[in-house]
């Protein structure tokens, strides 16, 4: 593999790993989703849990 392919593979893995955090960016419990994804995302259960939490949690309330 060339250096570019290694770099592209690492970036792809990084994006997939933090997908729950990206989905939860505008959610009420973003910090919790980030912590679970960061520390337990390497386990399949932790990653799926963070993904479900990020999809099902309510959005942040916007002050008007």
Image: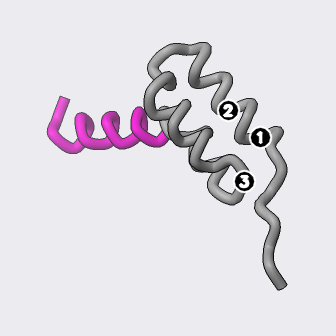
Q: Earlier in the sequence, mark 2 or mark 3?
A: 3
Q: Classify 60 as above or below 6.
A: below
The residue singled out by tag 1 in the image is 55
The residue singled out by tag 2 in the image is 51
Residue displayed at 73% across by 34% down: 53
Q: Name the element at disc 2.
A: helix
In 3D space, how far apart are the residues under numbered discs 2 and 3 (Cα atoms)?
12 Å
Q: Quadrant of the C terminus?
A: bottom right
In 3D space, how far apart are the residues under numbered discs 2 and 1 (Cα atoms)?
6 Å
Q: Which corner quadrant of the image does residue 55 belong to? A: top right
- Return the mark for residue 27: 3
Structure colour scheme? one colour
Instruction: Give whichever of 61, 19 is nearer the camera.
Output: 61
In 3D space, how far apart are the residues under numbered discs 3 and 1 (Cα atoms)?
9 Å
Q: Earlier in the sequence, mark 3 or mark 1?
A: 3
Counting from the top left corner in percent of width and height, residue 63 is at 80, 79
Q: Which residues are magenta?
A: 1-16
In the rendered image, residue 58 lying in the magenta stretch gets the answer: no
Q: Classify 56 as above or below 64.
A: above
> Within 10 angstroms of label 3, few (less than 14), some, or many (20 or more) residues?
some
Q: Name the element at disc 3.
A: loop
Q: Name the element at disc 1.
A: helix
Q: Which corner quadrant of the image does residue 10 belong to? A: top left
Instruction: Give whichever of 2, 61 is nearer the camera.
Output: 61
């Amino acid at each position: 593999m060339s250096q570019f392919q290694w770099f592209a593979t690492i970036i792809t893995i990084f994006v997939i790993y933090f997908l729950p955090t990206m989905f939860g960016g505008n959610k009420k419990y973003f910090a919790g989703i980030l912590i679970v994804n960061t520390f337990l995302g390497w386990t399949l259960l932790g990653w799926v849990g963070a993904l479900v939490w990020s999809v099902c949690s309510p959005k942040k309330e916007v002050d008007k």
